[in-house]
Structure formats: structure tokens, C-alpha cells
């Protein structure tokens, strides 16, 4: 009887011999040592599909992360202390911003004659993946804010012109004898001006001086030596950095607000002269600060030249005209 029951159990449990009895922990039976390894006919294809799937998953995850950015709140903060990334950065009119900088100085007990700076972000992009070339310029501000002057060299072989240059503050005056000293860097100044008569003899300096080589375009070539000397000795030089950014000082904080604003508008107007006629608005963002304060974003209304404003309006009207056309096509 016992033998027959054992035989019956063996027949019933034979199909499930790889698993333990019910109620016990299930564990797969060990494979026989003589078993052949499984075939991997499509291993390469499976690896490629897995790699593509992982790349797709990474892209989707990156897009999700971008979408998870902090959402700006539409309303303005009601308190003086708040998390800045939850609100749009406020912009101020230039007179209001200058007044805030003066107030910051009083509250912080910092130096009252500290410099005022601006950071101008430009749109240097053109059509067909081209960009506006980086440029440098010098501008004579309506209100001077420092006693510092630039060193200017005057090229002339006329003794009378040389005397006029010395009287008007030229650091170095001379003719072709200066070429050797400049090439050997024995003479170093900030700017170079010249009279037209000596220009054919200055060609060896063209590659050395580069943008500072005397030219009528830069107002460094002419007969009016006193005027050129005043422009380059007292002028403010600025240049484009990091392909699209201009950083320069414009005034002192203790100056009247009207003078600070006038200097700022003069620099912005000079910057916009380098904008190609085919390009859109040139100035994208304008920030003002003092040596010890935070930067304040300025409202560009009233600061850009009239031509810049007209182009902005034309672009807005063109976009408004394109929208109905696109809607009609989609319907």
C-alpha cells in the first residue's frame, strides 16, 4: 500500500519536479552540468535596441527636467523679503534706479563717490548664422566723472603742429623716428593720432597698432589737433566682451541724477551706431549698478535711439500680421 501511494505521488509531482512542495520557499532547480549554453542569435540586435531605448529614455527625462523649472508667479511680492526665482525680475526707469543706488549707499554707509557701472547685453546674431563683429569705441561723455586722462601720441613732422600738440597735453610728439620705438614697445600709449601728411610713412605700424592705427573713421586722423587730443584724452573707451556683453563705468554716484542719465544715454546711442541696418533691436538687456550695490534691470523705454524703437514696432506689427495667416492655414 505504501509503495503504491509513493508511486502515485511520484507520477503526480514529476511535471513540477523543479519546484519545492507548496507552502515552502520556491527556488528553481539547479541546471545540469552537461547542459549546453543558451543560443544568442539576436544578441547584437538586442543590444542596439537596448542602447537606443536608453538614449530615448535619457532625452525624455532631460525634457521632463526642463519642464520642471520653477514657474514664475504673475503677481508681485507683497513683502520686502521673498524668493526671487518665483517672480519676474523687476525693471525700473533709469531715474528711479539711480535714486535707489543713492539710497543703497546711504543705508550701507559706503563710499559716496564710488563709480556707477552698466552691463549692456547685445543681440549680435544676424541671418544665415552670421554674427556682428566684436567692436570697440571711444565716446566723449557730456559730464566728466574722473580726473584721469589717456596718454595720446601725435604723429607730425611739422614743428608748429608739434608745438600745438604739446600745449594741448600730448604725451608723445614726433615723426617717423618713433616707429622703431613703437615696434620695440619702448613707447606705450593709449591712443595714436596723426595728420594726413605723415600717413604714407606710418604703414609699417598698421599691423602693430591694428584698431588703434590712425584713421578718419575713428576720428584719429585730421588737421584739428586740439580737438582730436581732447576727444582721446578725455574720452571713455569701451569694447564688446564675451561676444555680446559690454561692461563700462559711466559716472560717479555723487553726481546729480540728470548727469548720470545723460552719460548713460550718450553711451547707449554710441553703441547703437554699430548695429547693422538689416538687424533687429540691438540692446537686449541693460543693468546698472554701483561698486557696492546689486544690479538693477532698467526699462529700455526712453533710453534707446528713435531708430531702434521704430524697428521694434515694425517687428511687433509684422508678428501680429503673421498670426492671422497662420491661424487661417491651420483651420
Image: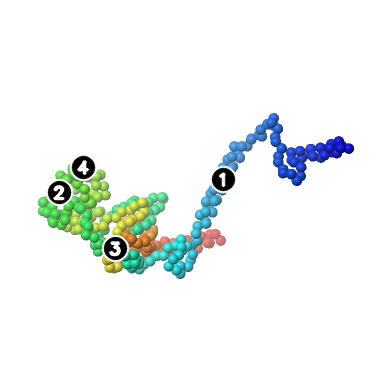
Secondary structure type for disc 1: helix
- The residue beneath circle 4 is 184
Tell me which numbered mark, 2 or 4, is placed earlier along the sequence.
2
- The residue beneath circle 3 is 111
Q: CA distance from mark 3 to mark 2?
A: 42 Å
Give the crowd class for mark 3: few <14, some 14-19, many >=20 residues within 10 Å. few
Residue 302 appears in the picture as rendered: no
Residue 174 got which mark? 2
- Location of residue 90 (image quadrant): bottom left
- Location of residue 206 (image quadrant): top left
- The residue beneath circle 1 is 54
Point 20% across, 53% down: residue: 151
Tell me which numbered mark, 4 or 3, is placed earlier along the sequence.
3
Q: CA distance from mark 2 to mark 1?
A: 71 Å
Point 35% across, 62% down: residue: 293
Location of the N terminus by quadrant is: top right
Give the crowd class for mark 1: few <14, some 14-19, many >=20 residues within 10 Å. few
Tell me which numbered mark, 4 or 1, is placed earlier along the sequence.
1
Q: CA distance from mark 4 to mark 3?
A: 42 Å
Give the crowd class for mark 2: few <14, some 14-19, many >=20 residues within 10 Å. some
Q: How far from the left and from the top, in percent, is residue 254?
A: 27, 66
Q: CA distance from mark 2 to mark 4?
A: 16 Å
Point 29% across, 55% down: residue: 238
Q: CA distance from mark 4 to mark 1?
A: 61 Å
In this rendering, the count of numbered labels is: 4
Q: How far from the left and from the top, in percent, is residue 260?
A: 29, 65
Point out the frontmost of discs 2 and 1: 1
65 with respect to 156 (left or right): right
Residues at circles 3 and 2 in contact by the CB criterion of under 8 Å: no
Q: Is residue 186 above or below residue 271?
A: above
Q: CA distance from mark 1 to mark 3?
A: 58 Å
Amino acid at each position: 500500500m505504501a509503495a503504491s501511494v509513493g508511486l502515485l505521488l511520484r507520477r503526480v509531482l514529476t511535471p513540477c519536479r523543479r519546484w519545492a512542495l507548496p507552502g515552502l520557499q520556491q527556488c528553481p532547480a539547479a541546471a545540469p552540468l552537461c547542459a549546453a549554453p543558451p543560443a544568442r542569435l539576436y544578441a547584437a540586435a538586442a543590444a542596439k535596441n537596448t542602447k537606443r531605448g536608453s538614449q530615448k529614455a535619457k532625452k525624455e527625462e532631460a525634457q521632463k527636467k526642463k519642464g520642471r523649472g520653477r514657474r514664475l508667479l504673475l503677481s508681485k511680492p507683497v513683502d520686502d523679503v521673498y524668493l526671487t526665482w518665483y517672480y519676474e525680475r523687476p525693471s525700473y526707469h533709469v531715474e528711479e534706479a539711480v535714486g535707489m543706488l543713492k539710497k543703497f549707499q546711504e543705508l550701507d554707509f559706503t563710499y559716496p563717490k564710488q563709480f556707477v557701472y552698466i552691463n549692456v547685453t547685445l543681440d549680435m546674431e544676424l541671418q544665415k548664422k552670421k554674427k556682428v563683429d566684436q567692436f570697440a569705441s571711444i565716446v566723449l561723455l557730456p559730464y566728466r566723472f574722473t580726473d584721469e586722462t589717456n596718454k595720446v601720441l601725435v604723429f607730425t613732422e611739422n614743428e608748429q603742429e608739434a608745438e600745438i600738440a604739446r600745449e594741448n597735453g600730448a604725451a608723445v610728439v614726433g615723426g617717423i623716428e618713433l616707429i622703431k620705438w613703437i615696434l620695440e614697445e619702448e613707447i606705450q600709449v593709449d591712443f595714436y593720432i596723426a595728420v594726413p601728411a605723415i600717413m604714407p610713412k606710418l604703414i609699417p605700424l598698421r599691423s602693430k597698432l591694428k584698431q588703434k592705427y590712425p584713421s578718419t573713421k575713428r576720428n584719429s586722423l585730421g588737421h584739428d589737433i586740439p580737438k582730436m587730443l581732447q576727444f582721446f584724452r578725455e574720452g571713455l573707451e569701451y569694447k564688446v566682451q564675451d561676444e555680446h556683453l559690454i561692461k563700462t563705468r559711466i559716472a560717479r554716484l555723487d553726481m546729480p541724477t540728470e548727469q548720470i542719465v545723460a552719460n548713460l544715454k550718450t553711451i547707449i546711442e554710441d553703441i547703437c551706431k554699430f548695429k547693422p541696418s538689416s538687424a533687429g533691436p540691438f540692446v537686449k538687456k541693460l543693468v546698472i549698478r554701483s561698486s557696492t550695490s546689486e544690479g538693477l534691470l532698467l526699462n529700455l523705454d526712453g533710453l534707446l535711439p528713435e531708430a531702434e524703437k521704430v524697428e521694434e514696432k515694425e517687428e511687433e506689427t509684422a508678428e501680429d500680421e503673421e498670426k492671422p495667416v497662420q491661424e487661417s492655414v491651420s483651420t
